Amino acid sequence: MDSVLIIVLSLVTLLMVLLAIVILTGNGDGLIAGYNTAKEEERKQFNMKRLRAVVAGLLLLTMAFVWCVALIDNMVVTLIGLLVLIVCNVAGIYIANRWCKKK
C-alpha cells in the first residue's frame, strides 16, 4: 500500500473520530443531516442521546469499512465491502428514524 494513501486515510480517520466525539458530547447536533434543518417541533420528537449514538456509530463503522477495503487490494472484496457499507448505512438510517424517535 502506498504511504501517501495511509497518511490520507489516517488523517480522514482522525477527523471522523473527532467528529464522532463532538457528536457524542452533544456539541455537534448541527452536523447531523436533517436534524439541523428541522423545525423545533420536529426536533423535539427525537431522543438526542440515541440519535447521537447512532450517527457516531455510523461514522466509525464507515471508517472501519474504508480501512478494510483499502488494506485488502482486491476488487471482489471492494465490491462486497461497498455493498455491506450501503446496507449498514441504510440500516442505520432506519434505526435513526425508528429507535431514536420518542414515543
Image (spheres, helix red, strand yellow):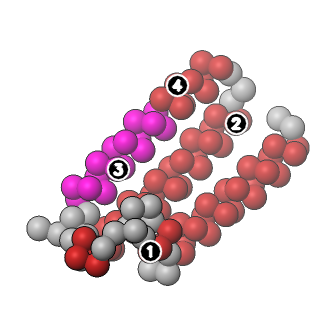
Mark 4 element type: helix
Q: Position of residue 73 (x, y in %)?
A: 72, 26
Earlier-in-chain disc, 3 versus 2: 2
Amino acid at circle 3: Ile
Q: Is residue 65 above or below residue 45?
A: above
Query: What is the distance, in whole Å, between disc 1 and disc 2 at their CAs?
Result: 30 Å
Q: Say which element carries label 2.
A: helix
- Write down the quadrant of residue 55 in the picture: bottom left
| Quadrant holding the N terminus | top right
Mark 3 vs 1, N-terminal side? 1
Instruction: Name the front one of labels 1 and 4.
Output: 1
User: Which residue shows up at 17% across the image and 69% down it?
Assistant: 102
Magenta stretch: includes residue 94: yes
Residue 24 part of the magenta segment: no
Cβ–Cβ under 8 Å for marks 3 and 1: no
Give the residue pinned by disc 2.
Answer: 70
Whole-angstrom CA distance, mark 3 to mark 2, is 25 Å
- What residue is shown with label 3? 93
Residue positioned 53% across, 55% down in the render? 60
Judged left or right of residue 51, residue 57 is: right
Residue behind mark 1: 29
Main secondary structure of the magenta stretch? helix
Residue hosting label 4? 80
Q: Above or below — where is 102 with respect to 71?
A: below
Q: Look at the image and give the residue range highlighted in magenta.
A: 84-99
